[in-house]
Amino acid sequence: MQIIWAEQALTGSGWQRHLRIEIADDGRISSLTPDSRPQGTRLGIALPAPANLHSHAFQRAMAGLAEQRSPQGQDSFWSWRALMYRFLELLDPDDVEAITAYAQLEMLKAGFAAVGEFHYLHHAPGGQHYDNPAEMAGRIMAASRQTGIGLCLLPVLYMQGGCDGREPSPKQRRFLCDFNDYSRILSVTEKASAGMPEDFSIGVAPHSLRAVTPCILDEIPALTSGNPIHIHIAEQQAEVSEVSAALGARPVEWLLENQPVDEAWCLVHATHMTGAETRALAASGAVAGLCPITEANLGDGIFPAHAFLAAGGRFGLGTDSNIQIDLAGEMRMLEYSQRLGRQERNVVAQQGCSCGATLLASACRGGAQALGRNSGAIAVGKLADIVEIDLQHPDFEGLEGDRLIDSWIFARTCNKVRNLWSGGRHVIMDGQHAQEADITNKAGRVFRRLRSAL
Ligand SMILES: [Zn+2]
């Protein structure tokens, strides 16, 4: 059992002062007692730590490498993807484990307690299958055991090069699977996860409507008994056109009409939607998986958050390409994209409410739902996913409650996490991870080698 005591804490039933938080050995919060005397690990503030619902960890090593305008001057998501495909040809399992551990370390230090890893790099360069179908999945699990982050592993099914069933390009061979390969990867991964912590889970992830046929998509929900189902959708206009031409409907429209989309689903991006699609997605109860920094970096477009929230939609946040791993930055970018698009301020909040507190609460609820994780609030019975941000800065002086969260998101430039618990594991202590030097050194060596080989 662990005891935390927080000067102030944002709990499932609002702000509490002098809160004693008891964490049982199973990682769950077993009691909350306000107005207690100081004891245990003392915090200035305790906030719920959200899950990062969408990551491709290996892409962390190419962050910042695609920021030069090409000689042709036609830079887009698709030209970025060409570099990403070149890059992933260079990665071996040791590289993937080192980069993943580093990305997860950064996630913890940014305030995320868990991650949904959308994992599609299954095979060796050239597409040869490893003897162990879960070789790469095993490396992601190993990284999470080292960092202590809560993991929902989402092995990805990627079958074809486009909606018309075209042959995949040679660069896509490392992630290609038919349905049988995919079922095998899932079952071997399941077995290999025997030693993982109790909060580990496995979901399924049909990559996109471009990469999975409608017939096979029908088989996917049966592979999982209520576990998360994640899919990339409507990130790019070109994708909307391709899906509309092939399937006769826009991506979100088609998915909602043809699949039993419900609370188990997470639609990643969902950037390009009509008003009717936006309302229908909100009504489905699925989570919109927003990745605002990546979407801005890739020039995807602006998610219609105002209309989606007005219709009661749920969203969570992901770091996707991991160009920059920054929880406060994701929340800020989401709100700022809305302000720029609508020429208004405080768009995501309801009247009279704090924008920052709304963003954090939504990210916590949506992230927990999307990963099927028993978390999302500091409440008895929930996993102890708790973060303390460092309040020792003039930006926070004289502030309390929601205003501290606003200041953290909108005013601080360096968002320092002092302590973080993931499923009760105290992984960031006084700003440091116990294995930080080892993880950082290994990643640095891998980054250097990859960059010289590009
Ligand atoms: Zn993605």
Image: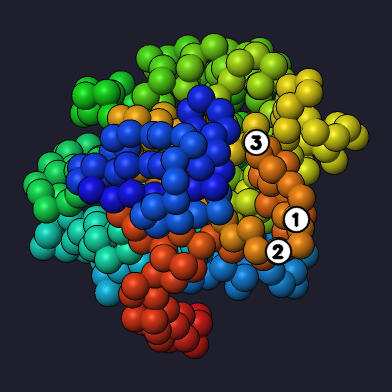
The residue to which callout 2 is attached is 393
CA distance separating discs 2 and 3: 19 Å
Quick one: label 2, few (<14), some, or many (20+) residues within 10 Å? few
Does residue 80 appear left or right of residue 131 in this picture?
right
Residue 219 is situated, as x and y percent measured from the top left of the image, at 25, 24
Q: Earlier in the sequence, mark 1 or mark 3?
A: 3
The residue to which callout 3 is attached is 357
- Mark 1 residue type: Glu
Q: Residue at x 33, y 26 (%)?
A: 217
Residue 422 is situated, as x and y percent measured from the top left of the image, at 36, 50
Quick one: label 3, few (<14), some, or many (20+) residues within 10 Å? some
Residues tagged 1 and 3 counted as in contact (Cβ below 8 A): no
Residues tagged 1 and 2 counted as in contact (Cβ below 8 A): yes
Residues tagged 2 and 3 counted as in contact (Cβ below 8 A): no
Residue 213 in sight = no
Q: Residue at x 12, y 59 (%)?
A: 132
CA distance separating discs 1 and 3: 18 Å
The residue to which callout 1 is attached is 397
Q: Which label lies toward us, 2 or 3? A: 2
Comparing 335 with 426, the one in front is 426
Which of the 4 quarters of the picture holds residue 278?
Answer: top right
Farthest-out residue, right:
343
Question: Which structural element holds mark 3?
Answer: helix
Question: Which structural element holds mark 2?
Answer: loop
